[in-house]
Image (cartoon, helix red, strand yellow):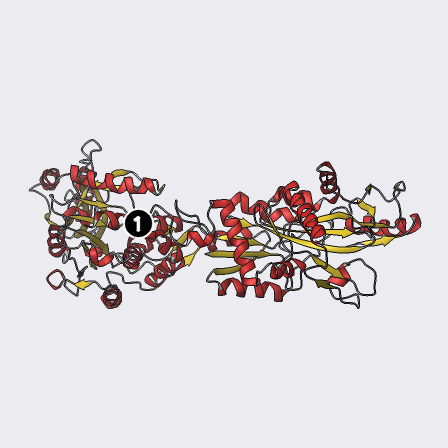
Amino acid sequence: MKVAVIYNRESMKVINLIGALNPEKYRVEAIQRITKTLKSLGHQVKTFEGDKHLIERLEEFMPAVVKGERPGMALNLAYGIQGSARYTHVPGILEMIGIPYVGSGPLSHSLSLDKVVAKVLFKQNGLPTPDFAVLETPDFEAPDLKYPLIVKPKSGADSFGLMVVNDEKELREAAVPLFEKYAEPVLAECYIEGREINIGLLGNPPEAFPPAELDFGDGPRVYTNDDKGGRSGRTVKYVCPAKLDEETTKKAQEIARKAFTTLQCHDCARVDMRIDEDGNLYLLELNSLPSLGYRGSFVEGAKHAGLDFAALLSRLLDSASKRYFDTPFVIQQMGTSKTSDGSLNFLTANRDKLEQRVEDLVSHSARTSDPVETRELVKQLNQRYRELGLLPVKELTDEHVVSTWETQEGLKGGTLIIVQVDSPLDSEIPYQAFRRTPELLYGEAVGFSRAPLAMAEYALRALRKQKKLQRKKIGILIYSDEGRDYRYSRNTIEQASSIAGQVIVLKQGAANDNLIVGSRGIRKYQLIVESKSRDLRPGVKTPDALSWTSNRIESMMELSSRKEKLGVFVTDIRTKHFPNMLPHRTQATILVSYPKPTIADETEEKIRSILGKTGPKWQLNLISDRPAMQDRKINRAFSERVINVAKELDISIAQETSATPSVAGIVPKDVPVICGLGPAIENPHTPHEAIQRLSLFQRTVLLTEVLMQEAR
């Protein structure tokens, strides 16, 4: 499980510092011990300062989860940077952004920090606590309390500002500096002469640890902040379990548990009490954020309750997990999701590795114009498939453009996954290196190729982990001539698809990130026009090649029809001319986007008619044809099954048709095919291409489940 350890140690990264800073901090050694212990328990751990950058950093470490996936857990150790409600800041942030955490919520911390409110609640609930008064201003009226008194800030913690006073003069001398330093009311309460004990609480409802007694030695029987920080010149020790009779122990533990529920705490707390010479118990305060430092009484009490430090941390995580999910983390590990045989658990545990694999793949530019780099990537992919136990299909492989692999059960009648390897970006476009933000993964071809390749690999790994891969009929075909309109791999793709029972073209989704069940085709033509060379004299009736071509192109584009889903476009015009002469040659690229081949044929005839039989010489050559993916019933039936799987996972997805063609268009008509199961993409085919991190994980889970159910 991912565990974010959140604390306040060094960072002062806030917008403004207002008032006194909170002096409570964990020692570096304590944080290191906690982190090391959590890692030894198998958790993936990262530490975070509880400052204004916390949300952004947590989102990168713990991105959003899918249904059935357990999110990570935050171990909140943050005492806050400033303010009277400082303990509430990090829990409030965690609740707002939806990250589970160990420990009490903002309300409990607020109640326990405000010692006056806490004591009022204690009294209302019949809990014994010393009499007290609140000193509102430095010119306060002396309280009607019996001396000696304990004086401390109203919202103080960790014994900061705590003093014992014996008369009104000492009270005023002690209180005035507290008003100045902490800028808040001062609490004065009757000092209980006697023994002091701490009781740690763990769980919901809480289990009480054996009481730990403070051994003050020969000095004052008050545990000051100087004592805790080792600055007083004496050592205050804990005696655990405290030497109390059984009746007093049980009564103290019961008071502690009732204080816990009174202040609505969760998971853990520490309650401080005093025992007077007559054996009466007095509840001093509840610490809603007990220290996990190795010298603290909470850890000491846990040890005598049979929990070493590792076991204590595990119990804290399990307690919070059970509170959030009704299941402790230990049981979660066994796989309780709706996904088949715990495949979600595998993918969750390897979510970071999935993103790392995307990064590795982005490091290979593998552009269509770079066959050397493309072959290196294909070679690496082939090695990966071999490691997964897949078998190469020689008759469906041409090492230069296409490779096909299958499980031991073979591909016949099974599911074929098709993924492109090459990036069709022009060589003039600068290479985009991988980078990660809290929501997006950027990189060259990350959406069209790199993420789908990683998805396919980890879906197969999840199946292998469940020992299901070799029992499924699955094939994977990778091709590397997408930038050449798959003219060389086309026959192999058609042949492999005809063997399969169904085909998944693993590309990004349509405009709304939906599955694609049909798409238009695109024919690419090269138009070459040649005319006689002519100079710049005006009034010559014979048009030059560029003028003539421009007029004809305008007429061609008027053939476009939204009703017929037909589009005629010109993407490139180049000319040749002699110095100080008008162009005598033009070369234009014409694209025809069409729904059916018959409409494309008719459109070509109309284009030829527009070019006519008079005027300059011209040639219209068909360069490539990306066939339309016909919107057939078998495609929609396949898509509906995938959508039903997505619904079980709470993944929103629908089906639609697309204007952009893919290799799905060359799949035989009697074979169901879908496209668009890849992750949501932003800024496609640009230097800023990116995919959504959540979508990458969701679609990998969905692909895994589809293969689990569809690959017979």
Q: Nearer the viewer, residue 231 or 589?
A: 231
For numbered disc 1, what is the local secondary structure? helix
Q: Nearer the viewer, residue 466 or 158?
A: 466
Q: How many numbered tags mark residues here?
A: 1
**Please, is residue 22 above or below residue 654 in the view?**
below
Residue at x-position 58% and y-position 60%: 306
Q: Is residue 193 visible to us here?
A: yes
Q: Nearer the viewer, residue 426 or 194?
A: 194
Residue at x-position 64% and y-position 46%: 257
Snapshot quadrant of residue 261: top right
Query: To which residue does mark 1 refer?
Result: 340
**Residue 431, x across and y down, in percent:** 35, 61
| Residue density around tag 1, few if under 14, some if 14–19, many if 20 or more, within 10 Å | some
Q: Quarter of the image containing the N terminus? A: bottom left
In the picture as drawn, the residue positioned furthest to the top comes out as 563
Is 280 left or right of 570, judged from the image as shown? right
Q: Is residue 98 visible to us here?
A: no
- The amino acid beneath tag 1 is Ser
**Residue 647, x across and y down, in percent:** 32, 39
Q: Which of 142 and 136 is in front in this view?
A: 142
**Residue 150, x across and y down, in percent:** 83, 50
**Residue 298, x across and y down, in percent:** 64, 57
Is 260 left or right of 421, judged from the image as shown? right
In the picture as drawn, the residue positioned furthest to the left comes out as 613
